[in-house]
Image (cartoon, grey):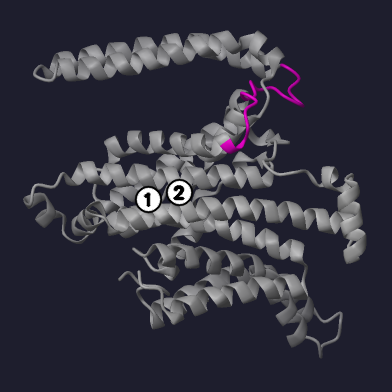
Amino acid sequence: MRVNRRNIGMFAVMALLITAVGVFQSWSVALAILNLCLISAIMSLGVNIQWGYAGLLNVGVMGFAALGGLAGVLVSMPPVTAAWQAGGSEVIVAVFILAITLIAGVYFYHRFRRNPLRRILVTSVIGIVGFLAFRSFLDPAVGAIEAVDAAKTGYLGGMGLPILLSWIVGGIFAAGAAWIIGKIALGLRSDYLAIATLGISEIVIAILKNEDWLTRGVKNVNGLPRPVPYEIELQQSELFRSIAADWGMSLIGLSSIVVKLCYAGLFTVVLLMVLWFSEKALRSPWGRMMRAIRDNETAAEAMGKNVTGRHLQVFVLGSAVIGLAGAMLTTLDGQFTPASYQPLRFTFLIWVMVIVGGSGNNWGAILGGFVIWFFWIEAEPLGLWLMDVITSGMDSNSWLRMHLLKSAAHMRLMTMGVILLLVLRFSPKGLIPER
């Protein structure tokens, strides 16, 4: 994409808006918004790879993001020794049985391809026997694990490795799930694919909510380690104390800003790396082939292109980027909360980012991520300020004034609708359309 003044101007406006939040609210809030905008931009890039490159309608974005968050727990949290002693070995045996069952089922499914009746009978027997054996080991182990100090632990924990490693693992988890889903669902029509991905996303999140031995379920996993310093560590530093005194800032405020700046630096590096790879892919012969498949599958298939195989490839790549962003979000929050992954609500938000920014354009996806998340966060305080100004002439106890002030929280939904309508009316291909 040729960078022009219009595009630079739109990114400059976003920078000014975030700066205005720092000036009129606080720099801590502005940096918090910036970090979430960076993660949203990465997630938007993942959806853009699937939809903008290949026209795949993935409505299961939150499921892949949740798998990235799960990676943060399994990689970075220390193992719970008592839980492993109570049922860890049985869980390993159960997982081994499940893997053997899947491998055997796939093998015999292909082995008896010419005999459909035998194929159905053999794979059914393997599936039933394997499932019963799997549950016979897993169920007692789960009960024993969840009974171990359930208020504090009640799960196996993780591997105690650096949390930055979980970003890569989160991408691998999401890519693996996408490969399995894609092998099943990518042969479906686009509307059926959307239904399938949404349903599978709900299944993934339901598992994470209910399998306490794996993620503590709705009790959440708190205290994930950080890749940046803790505020208390900075506040105890003599050098930091002297800097805060020289600048006339409180220790708490300055330490919060420094930590958020560290996160912003890490997230910016990842965003630039994903953008660079995405741009190289889009400009390559592979990218031109994907756009040709998107525009006319029949013609591309007639030219000898493996449409289903390429769809699977791009579906896996986009999901890996979403999983990476999910792991980054869990790292920023410092906790894993399965109940916070709401597929319909936040999947819609990510899709609005792609549509508003410009489907098929990586820079547009980034801009859309910044614009939508900024107004999603700031719509409520701006709405409250607007309602306060409008009703300033009314009596403080007026029922209408109280109603309008209480309704300010709903301004974000109206704001999203207005932004989407305005963009679709005046720039139907997005703020930075595909070239």
- Are the residues at dot 2 and dot 1 in contact (C-beta closer than 8 Å)? yes
Residue that mark 2 sits on: 61
Residue that mark 1 sits on: 58
Q: Amino acid at mark 1?
A: Asn
Element under label 1?
loop
| Magenta-drawn segment | 148-164
Q: Left or right? Give the position of 205 relative to 318.
A: right
Q: Quadrant of residue 313?
A: top left
Q: Based on the picture, tell me whether residue 216 belongs to the magenta stretch.
A: no
Q: Is residue 113 above or below residue 291?
A: above
Q: Left or right? Give the position of 344 relative to 176.
A: right
Question: Looking at the image, which residue is at 74% across and 78% down?
Answer: 385
Q: Please provide percent x and percent y for residue 168.
A: 50, 37
Q: Is residue 5 above or below residue 193?
A: below
How far separated are the C-alphas under marks 2 and 1? 7 Å
Q: Please provide percent x and percent y for residue 47.
A: 41, 54
